Amino acid sequence: MEIRPIKTRVFEVAENLLVFLDQYFLDIKEQSVLVVASKIVALSQGRAVPMVEGSAKEQIIQEESQLAIPTEQVYLTIKDGLFMANAGIDESNADNKMILLPSDSFQSAEMIRNYFQNKYQLKELGVIITDSHCLPLRAGVIAVALGYAGFVGLKDYSGQSDLFGRPFKFSKVDIADSLATAASLCMGEGDESQPLAIILRPPVEYCDKIDKNELIMLAQNDMYRPLLESLNN
């Protein structure tokens, strides 16, 4: 597997996303996954608001979340099945704006895939829309796939045998988020101006239809639920 980050100019609010991507995703080959930072997808949708603080900011966070719990530092929120801070609202590299998450990252990923699949007559092409993400009890950020298209996002080892013949019961690999993090490591989180990347020959199973809910873990089934509930006692 090889990851190639792509340096671009600054993307403007309400700019045409496909026209922009067409300038940088050149000569795409079979068995590739295109990676696009969620910020430029959100900007193309006009999902940017003036910077505000206090109650005005809190209202936006509440409106953008399915669940929002205030803490001393941030709002802990759930949005689109993901646990995140402040509904994913981004204030970095935003030119005094607050950038909201894209309205439907899966739909955007499918649109991008269809465009480049048709342009280059490709059969095996994937797309990931990425965003930075924090893990509980770990410093720093990784990345998460807000949406993806063209490949199976979850690899299930259940029923297969491990190295010593013991059958797996629950083991699954989050392919989409793993690729998002690998690409983000190359793209950078600062002033690199590399919101795009191409992953060549990733270990994925390509497909035309995906299950948008395959990575979602319901709260009642989450293995960390007892730990989180005990913190309130």
Image: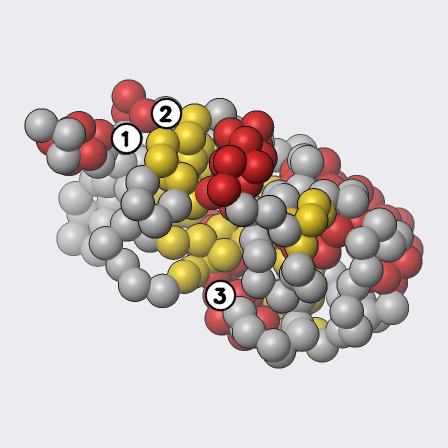
Please name the residue that numbered disc 3 is placed on: 182
Residue 61 pos. (x, y %): 52, 36
Distance between mark 3 and mark 1 Cα atoms: 25 Å
**Is 84 located above or below residue 60 in the figure?**
below
Few, some or many residues within 10 Å of mark 1 (<14, 14–19, 20+): few
**Residue at 57% across / 57% down in the picture?**
91
Q: Does residue 112 appear left or right of residue 128 in this picture? A: right
**Residue at 32% across / 25% down in the picture?**
219
Residue 29 pos. (x, y %): 76, 66
Please name the residue that numbered disc 1 is placed on: 222
Q: Does residue 166 appear left or right of residue 31 in this picture? A: left
- The amino acid type found where label 3 is placed reads Ala
Distance between mark 2 and mark 3 Cα atoms: 26 Å
- The amino acid type found where label 2 is placed reads Leu
Q: Earlier in the sequence, mark 3 or mark 1?
A: 3
- The amino acid type found where label 1 is placed reads Asp
Disc marking residue 218: 2
Is the residue under label 1 in contact with that under label 2 (CB below 8 Å)?
A: yes
Residue 11: which quarter of the image? bottom right
Few, some or many residues within 10 Å of mark 2 (<14, 14–19, 20+): few
Residue 156 pos. (x, y %): 39, 39
